[in-house]
Image (cartoon, helix red, strand yellow):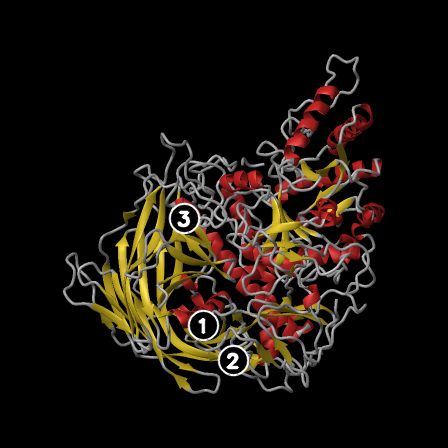
């Protein structure tokens, strides 16, 4: 980019703003901009930063300073499970025992006061911490206070950046950072983000880090072409402007690419897992090598320093699960430092080497007061060589990816009900339930399991099979406590104790209660801040049913037969208030059978008539000869677009004469550039009732789809089922759903970044360097977390996903999404086994929602619908009847936690119990600047959170502005070279609030949250307090 900026904001010492105040008035705040957060509550942080950057070691200002960063990278699951890594089990698979690493590191740090170490994965550290004596814990606190043990990143895990949703990223960061705050206070606050291993880097991740108050961002993996260009231009470090909506510097973050990914320099690895010779400084020894090592190190440091702009450079001294014998590392590093620095006097060397940390290195860069180039796109896709694009993991293990997304939905429901009900949700008639947000030492409660799934080898699908099974097990076990909590909360809020049932197989039409009971109740909880109308679909027996709403009024319902299985589903539309529930009753009508529906099976020869399904908003037509979708029409906007949708498969490469690289869990590399059709035509069945219209398409024995429209639905739903993918022909297969249209898109398409902002993509192009494209398919794939769309400037076709997938537009007017993959060989990135799932991962069902709109108004459709998909209503079932929760309170069949709905552009991101008298609230403006021109949803919005003071939420801004980002820049005059520059707004950088979560101010809640009915008692809502795999 041509823009340049200076940064400031690395903080040393005190924690107050320029006015000396830690709080802001709650009366009237600036408006929340599109894509900004309002964080209410958070952590109390009393006093100034105890250490800050003042504990950093002394450097030599006139020398090249080499900052040695001693660290270990401890995957929270990969080749072994989380527990196997922690305890050091199955070392024949990979030698790794995290508990021994931490034991050894602490002992070595205590032996020599100049030594420093960096640790990242709080999932491991917190477990180790709870096993230590009080005396050991106090010694560790002293090390942290002295800056010798530094935490970087601070999340529960080092999360993936492609397959993660921004809400889940925030939650896992919250969990880890809260542990550090509770354990070490402000001393433990991480000052830098440290994502050394994720396989590409998203702009939204950088934006979140900036808004969380990090001073800088370090990462290791960078596309090999991009890295070569950056080294040549000395742009290995720059300012990342990570949001197009937030006004700078709200999402600005200083970013540094580490020189050697995250490994030690060649020949300088002194771990038990390495084979490099130790430092022998005794000249009488026949193994003496000190002189040669010093010479080599000086040459290495000088060469590396040429790629960076200051007289400081960093060397990572550690790698995967290293430092189990920390003394071996530190003893050799001690000698290296002493011998290299001795050359300053002996030979007038201008190289100074020291133990350091990422934060201390960043502090020295800040003092250099340079102007840095600005980056505005992201770092996807990542390739580590020609034909080696890491774009397969965008879609690997789709069943696990869906399970993670469902678990996020369920966790938010549990968090909200715990906040609304209070202690009665944690301990009630159904037992003890807990969301696990409170940091007791018990493992695997729901937030912890969800946090573990964000790890860059978990939701990414890049672990070994038994590890993926263990991730799924942790999620499954974590649902139990939340189900108990949900039951307690619903009983208290509804005033009635029932035999609640959670049916987890509704997506395959299995629920014994609804299929066998003569009567039952359906409770639908809505976690959104607005009322939703939701089509409830439950498997039943072949009977007629009477459905009544919360007021006892009969509502329309249908029983339809599922053609693929001849099972029956009951359908009815439910209206559910904001942040609340509605209870519907269902009763079987004896002696009656459901009416027949219009069902048109296609024989082996295609039927002659055109298949059409439509509601009041959408019409879809299907080709009479092939049974494939051929046209979508938006009836409201009078838009008609030819759309052909079909399933294809790429035959996965196992290596060829161009490269030995094969497709695997990480890598996507098709053998040929053109995919093969699963089938040229589909056998179809048409289902039409008053409540649903469906075309069932059967493409093969392992691929089918239902194209569906419900009344009032403004999108076309495509529910696909794929698997088991056949491999008897010895070809691995990567299955895609492709939409071909007549739109003239000029090589452009658009994908979301972690479910939030949208980035423009251009085929065979990178914004910051000239791409040499070696893989026209895989090299154009990008992560699609929630949506992908194409537009010709007038008409827009958007496809929403129900999980993270890889996607692209490989031809004008085309969209493709990879839905499943099954591969026969490993891709040589360390996993050591092919992506050949067995069991539940063989067979995958998912949904794509297709929206056709005018380009200027499309955002309101896909934004609001994506919000509904991520936070879908939760269905809880119960047999008829029940007993009163309290004799003094009449049962209720409907409840809302809000007195009034939130505006459409405001999303309630988090409502959770934080402490005995404290709630955690997060709101966000969910539209980008200028994104919606139809309903004005991109404008600043005001809503009443407390009376009498409204809170104004404007676009492009987070609250309060002085705490949005530690990296400050201010537009300045154009320099002589014509480039835009920025300059710092002041001299010494003042510190911002030392919070662990994105900053905000507290507000009172009673006027927003309706208290639950007594008894046992109304819950008080007081004022929240402020508070190695190969390259």
Label 2 Cα neighbours within 10 Å, binned few <14 / some 14-19 / many ≥20: many
Q: Is residue 67 above or below residue 20?
A: above
Relative to 636, 391 lies left or right: right
776 or 304: which is nearer to us? 304
**2 or 1: mark nearer the eye:** 1
Q: On the image, numbered disc 3 is attached to which residue?
A: 780
Q: On the image, numbered disc 2 is attached to which residue?
A: 577
Picture quadrant where residue 659 is located: top left
Give the Cα separation between the discs numbered 3 and 1. Answer: 27 Å
Q: Label 2 near label 3: C-beta < 8 Å?
A: no
**Mark 3 or mark 2: whose residue is earlier in sequence:** 2
Residue 655 placement (x, y as % from top left): 38, 33
For residue 860, the mark is 1
Residue at the (51%, 76%) spot, across then down: 904
Q: How many labels were placed on the picture?
A: 3
Residue 278 placement (x, y as % from top left): 72, 23
For residue 781, the mark is none
Q: Is residue 236 above or below residue 596?
A: above
Relative to 842, 1 lies left or right: right
Label 3 Cα neighbours within 10 Å, binned few <14 / some 14-19 / many ≥20: many
**Mark 2 or mark 1: whose residue is earlier in sequence:** 2
Q: Is residue 543 above or below residue 289?
A: below
Give the Cα separation between the discs numbered 2 and 1. Answer: 21 Å
Residue at the (53%, 71%) spot, across then down: 500
Q: Is residue 564 above or below residue 57?
A: below
């Amino acid at each position: 980019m041509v823009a340049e900026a200076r940064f400031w904001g690395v903080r040393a010492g005190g924690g107050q703003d320029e006015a000396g105040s830690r709080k802001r008035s709650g009366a009237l705040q600036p408006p929340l901009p599109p894509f900004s957060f309002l964080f209410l509550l958070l952590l109390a942080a009393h006093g100034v930063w105890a250490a800050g950057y003042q504990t950093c070691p002394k450097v030599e200002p006139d020398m090249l300073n080499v900052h040695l960063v001693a660290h270990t990278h401890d995957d929270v699951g990969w080749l072994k499970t989380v527990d196997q890594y922690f305890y050091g089990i199955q070392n024949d698979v990979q030698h790794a025992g995290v508990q021994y690493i931490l034991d050894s590191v602490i002992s070595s740090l205590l032996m020599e006061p100049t030594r420093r170490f960096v640790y990242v994965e709080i999932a491991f550290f917190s477990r180790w911490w709870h096993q230590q004596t009080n005396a050991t814990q106090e010694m560790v606190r002293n090390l942290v206070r002295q800056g010798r043990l530094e935490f970087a990143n601070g999340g529960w895990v080092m999360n993936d950046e492609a397959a993660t949703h921004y809400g889940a990223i925030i939650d896992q960061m919250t969990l880890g950072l809260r542990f550090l705050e509770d354990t070490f206070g402000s001393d433990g606050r991480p000052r830098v983000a440290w994502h050394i291993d994720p396989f590409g880097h998203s702009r939204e991740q950088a934006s979140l880090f900036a808004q969380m108050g990090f001073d800088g961002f370090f990462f290791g993996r960078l596309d090999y072409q991009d890295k070569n260009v950056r080294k040549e231009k000395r742009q290995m470090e720059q300012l990342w402007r990570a949001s197009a909506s937030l006004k700078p510097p709200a999402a600005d973050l200083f970013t540094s690419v580490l020189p050697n990914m995250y490994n030690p320099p060649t020949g300088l690895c002194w771990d038990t897992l390495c084979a490099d010779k130790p430092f022998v400084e005794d000249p009488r020894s026949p193994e003496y090598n000190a002189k040669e090592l010093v010479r080599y190190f000086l040459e290495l440091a000088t060469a590396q320093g040429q790629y960076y702009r200051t007289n400081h450079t960093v060397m990572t001294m550690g790698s995967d699960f290293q430092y189990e014998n920390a003394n071996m590392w530190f003893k050799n590093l001690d000698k290296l430092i002493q011998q290299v620095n001795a050359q300053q006097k002996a030979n007038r060397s201008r190289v100074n080497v020291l133990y350091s940390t990422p934060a201390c290195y960043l502090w020295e860069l800040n003092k250099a007061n340079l102007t840095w180039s600005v980056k505005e796109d992201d770092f996807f896709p990542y390739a580590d060589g020609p034909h080696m694009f890491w774009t397969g993991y965008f879609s690997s293990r789709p069943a696990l990816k869906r399970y993670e997304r469902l678990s996020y939905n369920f966790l938010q429901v549990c968090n909200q009900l715990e906040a609304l009900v209070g202690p009665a949700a944690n301990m009630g008639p159904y037992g003890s339930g807990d969301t696990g947000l409170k940091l007791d030492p018990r493992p695997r409660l729901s937030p912890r399991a969800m946090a573990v799934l964000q790890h860059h080898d978990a939701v990414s699908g890049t672990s070994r099979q038994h590890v993926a099974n263990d991730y799924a097990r942790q999620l499954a076990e974590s649902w139990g406590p939340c189900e108990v909590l949900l039951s307690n909360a619903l009983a208290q809020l509804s005033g009635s104790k029932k035999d609640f049932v959670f049916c987890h197989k509704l997506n395959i039409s299995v629920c014994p209660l609804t299929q066998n009971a003569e009567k039952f109740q359906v409770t639908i909880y809505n976690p959104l801040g607005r009322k939703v109308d939701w089509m409830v679909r439950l498997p039943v027996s072949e009977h007629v049913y009477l459905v009544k709403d919360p007021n006892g009024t009969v509502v329309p319902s249908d029983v339809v037969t599922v053609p693929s299985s001849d099972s029956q589903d009951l359908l009815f539309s439910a209206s559910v208030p904001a942040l609340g529930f509605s209870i519907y009753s269902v009763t079987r009508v004896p002696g009656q059978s459901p009416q027949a529906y219009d069902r048109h099976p296609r024989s082996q020869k295609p039927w002659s008539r055109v298949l059409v399904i439509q509601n009041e908003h959408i019409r879809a037509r299907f080709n009479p000869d092939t049974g494939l979708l051929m046209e979508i029409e938006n009836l409201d906007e009078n838009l008609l677009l030819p759309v052909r949708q079909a399933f294809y498969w790429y035959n996965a490469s196992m290596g060829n004469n161009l490269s030995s690289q094969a497709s695997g869990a990480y890598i996507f590399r098709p053998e040929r550039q053109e995919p093969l059709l699963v089938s040229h035509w589909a056998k179809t069945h048409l289902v039409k009732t008053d409540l649903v219209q469906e075309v069932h398409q059967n493409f093969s024995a392992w691929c089918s789809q239902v194209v569906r429209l419900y009344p009032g639905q403004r999108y076309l739903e495509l529910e696909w089922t794929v698997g088991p993918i056949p491999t008897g022909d010895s070809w691995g297969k990567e299955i895609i759903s492709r939409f071909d249209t007549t739109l003239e898109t000029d090589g452009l398409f658009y994908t979301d970044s972690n479910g939030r902002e949208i980035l423009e993509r251009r085929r065979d192009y990178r914004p910051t360097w000239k791409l040499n494209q070696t893989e026209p398919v895989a090299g154009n794939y990008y992560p699609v977390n929630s949506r992908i769309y194409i537009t010709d400037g007038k008409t827009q076709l958007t496809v929403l996903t129900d999980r993270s997938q890889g996607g692209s537009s490989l031809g004008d007017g085309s969209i493709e999404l990879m839905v499943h993959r099954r591969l026969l060989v490993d891709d040589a990135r360390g996993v050591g086994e092919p992506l050949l799932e067995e069991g539940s991962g063989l067979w995958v069902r998912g949904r794509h929602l297709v929206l056709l709109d005018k380009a200027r108004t499309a955002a309101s459709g896909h934004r609001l619908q994506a919000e509904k998909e991520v936070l879908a209503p939760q269905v809880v079932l119960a047999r008829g009847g029940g007993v009163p929760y309290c004799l003094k309170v009449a049962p209720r069949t409907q409840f809302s936690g809000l007195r009034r709905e939130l505006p459409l552009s405001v999303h309630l991101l988090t409502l959770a119990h934080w402490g005995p008298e404290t709630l955690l609230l997060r709101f966000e403006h969910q539209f980008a600047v200028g994104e919606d021109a139809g309903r004005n949803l991109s404008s600043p919005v005001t809503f009443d959170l407390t009376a009498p003071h409204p809170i104004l939420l404007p676009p492009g801004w987070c609250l309060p502005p002085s705490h949005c980002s530690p990296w400050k820049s201010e537009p300045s005059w154009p320099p002589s070279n014509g480039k835009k520059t920025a300059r710092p707004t002041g001299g010494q950088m003042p510190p911002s609030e030392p919070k662990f979560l994105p900053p905000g101010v507290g507000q009172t809640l009673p006027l927003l949250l309706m208290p639950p009915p007594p008894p046992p008692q109304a819950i008080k809502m007081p004022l929240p307090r402020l508070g190695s795999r190969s390259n």
